[in-house]
Image: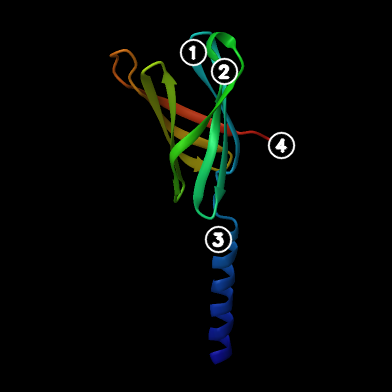
Amino acid sequence: MKSLRILAATFVASCLMTAAAFAADPSGSWKWSQAGRQGQQEITAKLVLKDGKLTGSVLQPGRGGGEPMPIDISDASFKGDVVAFSTVRTFGDNKIVTKYEGKLDGDSIKGTIERGAFNGQEATKSDWAATKAKM
């Protein structure tokens, strides 16, 4: 009977360790499209989760179709299956903060983007659906 309990405990521990090994990880390149001044634009985020800390950058098309500009993410977190981070862009004296939050589900993140106000306009919120790029 005692050996059966030990075997059951070993099985449960093994299952828990396996589940932890396959826990969700947002690391990788993520792509999505959004409307911009030049029409639909493809955006890429490169995220890295290491030692519980989320870092990375978002690569957005340059102004007027210029070279893409990488923007480091800030206020980043990954808790449970929720990815959250912000980007800050500066235009003259104006800082525009964009907040991203979404639920990671396999190779997709679905949630919302909140774009900060610019020139006295109100902040806007829209749906966000990113797909993990295949390497």
Q: Element at badge 2?
A: loop
Q: CA distance from mark 1 to mark 3?
A: 40 Å
Residue with the most extreme right position: 135
Do the residues bearing badges 2 and 1 touch, measured as CB atoms within 8 Å? yes
Circle 3 packing at 10 Å, graded few (<14), some (14-19), many (20+), is few
Residue sitting farthest toward the front? 93
Name the residue rendered at 57%, 18% in the picture. Answer: 61
Real-space Cα distance between discs 2 and 3?
37 Å
Instruction: For mark 3, give the secondary structure.
Output: helix
Label 4 packing within 10 angstroms: few (<14), some (14-19), many (20+): few
Q: Is disc 1 surrounded by few (<14), some (14 to 19) or many (20+) residues within 10 Å?
A: few
Mark closer to the chain start, 2 or 1 = 1
Q: Quadrant of the N terminus?
A: bottom right
Q: Quadrant of the C terminus?
A: top right
Please name which of the two marks, 2 or 1, marks the residue nearer to the observer.
2
**Residue 37 in the image: above or below residue 58:** above
**Disc with the residue nearer the chain's start (2 vs 4):** 2
Q: Position of residue 104 (x, y in %)?
A: 50, 42
Residues at marks 2 and 1, CA–CA distance in whole angstroms: 9 Å
> Dot 4 corresponds to which residue?
135
Crowding at dot 2, Cα within 10 Å, few <14 / some 14-19 / many 20+, comes out as: some
The span from disc 4 to disc 1 (Cα, nearest Å) is 27 Å
87 displayed left or right of 13: left
- Residue 114 position in % (x across, y down): 37, 27
Q: Could you tell me the amino acid type at mark 1?
A: Gly
Residue located beneath label 2 in the image:
61
Mark yes or no: residue 33 visible: yes
Earlier residue among tags 4 and 1: 1
Q: Residue at x 59, y 71 (%)?
A: 14
Mark 3 sits on what residue? 20
Name the residue that disc number 1 marks.
36
Q: Quadrant of residue 32?
A: top right
